[in-house]
Image: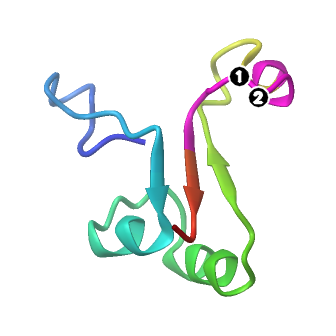
Amino acid sequence: MYSDDPLRNPSATRYSRLTFDKVLSDKLNVMDATAIVMCRDNHLPLRVFNLNNSGDLTRIVRGEDVGTSVTLE
């Protein structure tokens, strides 16, 4: 996840970790706000990553730091 669209704004900042509240307050629009709230309220951490990057899912399963981790704190 980025602070802005990195294709339109080359100075956009990549986040490796965020809280649910930060995703909502900054209106990062990675997924539906209701889904974010439901994950937060049910203590379900998220890992947001680009499905188009070949091998990223395997790297995540192996424990590599890919994408953005979204948690309560």
Checking the image for residue 60, the label placed there is 2
Helix, strand or loop status at disc 2: helix
Q: How many marks?
A: 2
Structural crowding at the residue carrying mark 1, measured as other residues with C-alpha within 10 Å and reported as few (<14), some (14–19) or many (≥20): few
Residue 47: x and y in percent read: 66, 47
Q: Quadrant of residue 28?
A: bottom left
Query: Is 51 drawn above or below residue 17 in the view shown?
Result: above
Q: Label 2: few (<14), some or many (≥20) within 10 Å?
A: some
Question: Where residue 52 appears, x then y in whole percent?
Answer: 64, 22
Residue, x 27% and y 38% (percent of image)? 5
The numbered disc on residue 64 is 1
Task: Please say if the residues under marks 2 and 1 sit with CB atoms less than 8 Å apart.
Answer: yes
Give the answer, above or below, for where 31 lies relative to 56.
below
Magenta residue span: 58-68
Residue at figure coordinates x 84%, y 20% from the top left: 58
Q: Is 50 within the magenta? A: no
User: Which residue is painted at 43% across and 42% down in the image?
Assistant: 1
Q: Residue at x 68, y 75 (%)?
A: 39
Q: Which of 37 and 19 is in front in this view?
A: 19
**Where does the image place residue 20, in percent across and percent down from the top left?**
49, 70
What is the three-letter code of the residue carrying label 2?
Ile
Report the amino acid beneath label 1: Glu
- Where is residue 23 drawn, in percent x and y? 40, 65
Q: Is mark 1 on a helix, strand or loop?
A: loop
